[in-house]
Amino acid sequence: MIKKILIANRGEIAVRIVRACAEMGVKSVAVYAEPDRYALHVKKADEAYSLGPDTVAGYLNAHRLVNLAKAAGCDALHPGYGFLSENPELADICARRGVYFIGPTSEVIHKMGDKTEARNAMTAAGIPVTPGSDGNVANLEEALSISEKVGYPIMLKATAGGGGRGIRKCDSANDLKRNYERVISEATKAFGQSDVFIEKFIENPKHIEVQILADQHGNAIHLFERDCSIQRRHQKLVEIAPSPQLTDEQRDMLGELAVKAALAVGYTNAGTVEFLLDKNENFYFMEMNTRLQVEHPITEVITGVDIVQEQIRIASGLKLKYSQEQIIKRGYAIEFRINAEDPKNDFLPSFGKINRYFAAGGPGVRTDGAIYSGYTIPPYYDSMCAKLIVWALDWDAVLDRAERALNDITVAGVKTTIPYHLEILKSAEFQAGKFDTSFVAEHPELINYSVRHSNREMAAAVGAAIAASMGL
């Protein structure tokens, strides 16, 4: 069994992994760049080591991270999500240095990270994929020819893309001509690779992903699905498990397809298989994420499975703790990403000092975060500062609990997406469980909320002003 893990990440996911390690009796080692010296994951871990003054470079240096793991006596490394979590080189270096990589093999990461290879692998396995190019397009002329055959609108995508970057919708040949070099430039800067491919644009789909676990002994299971349709510019805002929009027959079919996909590529550890559901109820494979997902907690609360602990067990060479028959979903869970952003100002990041922070609590409420009162959110990283997860036995109950919990949580000193999430909850479409990826774009009125200040927030503001005036 793995005894000591270096967590090659920061923020709330690093804190989440530290907690899983503590419950398993595994030692945790944090790393931090200078802006993160006083971060919560540094305070919580058993040990912590500096990556130097550069804000990002240390988190992206695979050799240095593995060297640190070896020097600290770690026998494993957990990449979290983001940064190098889907970097095959990191997994390869770990394997060569005798450090367990808590994730799939470098070969699988490479194959599924290359969107064209992933599409080809799924086609070979009998998984439906969206119509598009068979591989990368060589030039603009070929892109125009393929797009004419597929039919506009199309999506021009970076082969190594992710996180909503390196992607453009093109409604016509002129759009494609205008965006072709732009996507290549963005892909090269963001991913160091200029390859692009073409997919048919699915009009206003539902975005459904299936959580899978697979061990090194040929066993694979799914933990049901999550609905990630509430998103803005391909960035998820709210996730739900299970999807209130699927029938049991669709759910079973998707789960079987996801397991089939995992087995087809020799997948191990935790991952997700993502699908688009069109207006005609057709499912298409979109991509496989070879890492832990931000929204994994909602799957944990409806199934009772600790996904991070299972990741550690699988990386240790153990068989899956559960069979498919033992995985039972119970109730509904919703995750709200609490971002330090101003929805009224085009979701502009709102970094700065948190004067007061109170996590939501009570029955069926979980808050995963990396913030505390007095913490300063640095401007160098993602704006997500916490995740609010609520659970209840039925859909109406989880909506009521979500409203209560969003009113309960307090983050003073920076603007957040909390009031925007409350507006989403008021939407008749959301309450009915009927929405797709166009939801945010089609409801611009959601940003017309009035900011309400509780007595507690007012007291915090007055206290902060008094302290400032006294030079405290």
Image: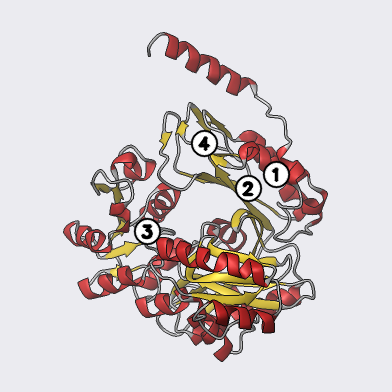
Horizontally, residue 16 falls left or right of residue 230, namely left
- Between discs 3 and 2, the one toward the N terminus: 3
Q: Quadrant of the C terminus?
A: top left
Q: Is residue 200 above or below residue 311?
A: below
Q: Mark 1 and mark 2 in contact (Cβ < 8 Å)?
A: yes
Which of labels 2 and 1 is toward the front?
A: 1
Residue at 51% x, 79% y: name it.
Answer: 139
Q: In the rendered image of this protein, does residue 14 appear above or below residue 278?
A: above
Using a 10 Å C-alpha cutoff, classify the residue at mark 2 as few (fewer than 14 neighbours), some (14 to 19) or many (20 or more). Answer: some
Mark nearer the N terminus (2 vs 1): 2
What element does badge 3 sit on?
A: helix
Separation of marks 4 and 2 at Cα, in angstroms: 29 Å
Task: Name the residue tied to disc 3.
Answer: 24
Cα–Cα gap, marks 3 and 2:
23 Å
| Mark 4 residue type | Ser
Q: Is residue 425 left or right of residue 310?
A: right
Secondary structure of residue under mark 2: loop
Q: Which residue is mark 4?
A: 350
Classify mark 1: helix, strand or loop.
helix
